[in-house]
Image: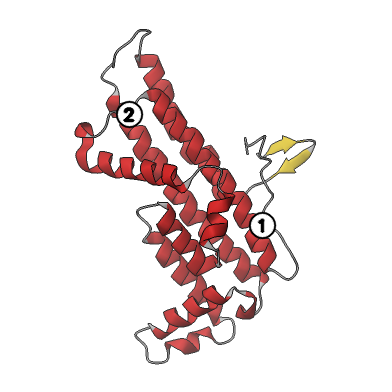
């Protein structure tokens, strides 16, 4: 159930709701377990496996959110646009490119009528499935190609710098490849990462809501904006 602010129901994207209610709790439970197993006092308690698992889970949750919200936006555009002319020029160009790359000599004909909707959704989904390093560059490229998002606009919408996200994803890669030999992650550090990634999803959700609304001539919004001071949604 969505949060209530000032008597109004606040419903963010389905992707944000899934992140907050199904994905993020796995990480917060790891934090709680770490706290329960770590008695007061100084020194490491050989609980690095818990915090490392938290980093892996959190990064996977962030990656899945980006994939889900991109596809959710694409579905909204398909549902509200009768012709592809409403799409940003970059997206239309990518659609033509994808149809020409079809092994069938007449793949471009798939764009005729409402066929462009199937091509669009299939291609967006395929590119989202190939996202495995959710750093700024990869995310901005995905959103630029398939939603027409300008890189500078996305960066400006984020409260935290792109470098903080990239460092976090780099740490995820180090843990995935080196395991216990990777950098030790303190509990308070993991807690900070949770807050940071949570904010990234809020900022992205609000930004994409505005961006998608600006594309549609009816100025329809795909979901509600999350209040910046109250983001329990």
Residue occupying the point 72% across, 36% down = 4
* Left or right: where 118 falls relative to 170: right
Task: Please tell me how crowded label 1 is: few (under 14), some (14-19), or many (20+) other residues with Cα within 10 Å.
Answer: some
Mark 1–mark 2 Cα distance, whole angstroms, equals 36 Å
Kindly tell me whether residue 14 is visible in this rendering.
Answer: no
Q: Position of residue 6 (x, y in %)?
A: 79, 35
Q: Is residue 175 left or right of residue 66?
A: left
Is 190 drawn above or below residue 142 in the view shown?
Answer: above
State yes or no: discs 1 and 2 in contact (Cβ < 8 Å): no
Q: From the image, tell me which residue sits under label 1.
A: 210
Rendered residue at 51%/42% (across/down): 160
Q: Secondary structure at mark 1?
A: helix
Quadrant of residue 227 within the rendered picture: top right
Q: Is residue 43 above or below residue 55?
A: above
Give percent across and percent down for residue 146: 51, 68
Where does the C terminus fall, quadrant-wise? top right
Looking at this view, name the residue that lies furthest to the top: 41
Front-most of residues 14 and 155: 155
Vertical placement of 139 versus 159: above or below? below
Q: Residue 27, image x and y in percent?
A: 43, 33
Q: Residue at x 53, y 74 (%)?
A: 90
Q: Is residue 161 left or right of residue 35?
A: right
Residue with the mark numbered 2: 185
Q: Is residue 23 visible?
A: yes
Considering the image in quadrants, where does the N terminus appear?
A: top right
- Residue 163 lies, in percent from the top left, at 42, 45
Q: What residue sits 60% from the left and 56% below the top?
A: 208
User: Toward which corner of the image does residue 131 lie, by quadrant?
Assistant: bottom left
- Quadrant for residue 105, please give it: bottom left
Q: How is the image coloured?
A: secondary structure
């Amino acid at each position: 159930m969505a949060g209530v602010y000032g008597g109004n129901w606040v419903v963010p994207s389905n992707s944000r709701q899934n992140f907050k209610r199904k994905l993020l709790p796995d990480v917060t439970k790891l934090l709680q377990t770490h706290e329960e197993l770590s008695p007061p006092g100084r020194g490491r308690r050989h609980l690095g496996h818990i915090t490392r698992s938290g980093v892996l889970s959190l990064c996977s949750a962030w990656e899945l959110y980006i994939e889900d919200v991109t596809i959710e936006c694409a579905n909204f555009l398909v549902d509200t646009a009768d012709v592809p002319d409403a799409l940003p020029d970059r997206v239309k160009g990518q659609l033509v490119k994808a149809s020409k790359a079809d092994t069938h000599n007449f793949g471009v004909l798939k764009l005729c009528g409402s066929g462009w909707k199937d091509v669009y959704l299939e291609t967006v989904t395929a590119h989202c499935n190939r996202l495995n390093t959710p750093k700024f560059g990869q995310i901005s490229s995905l959103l630029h190609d398939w939603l027409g998002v300008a890189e500078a606009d996305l960066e400006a919408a984020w409260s935290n710098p792109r470098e903080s996200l990239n460092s976090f994803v780099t740490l995820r890669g180090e843990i995935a490849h080196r395991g216990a030999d990777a950098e030790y992650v303190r509990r308070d550090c993991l807690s900070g990462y949770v807050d940071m990634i949570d904010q990234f999803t809020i900022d992205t959700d609000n930004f994409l809501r505005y961006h998608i609304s600006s594309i549609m001539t009816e100025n329809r919004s795909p979901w509600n904006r999350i209040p910046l001071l109250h983001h329990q949604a």
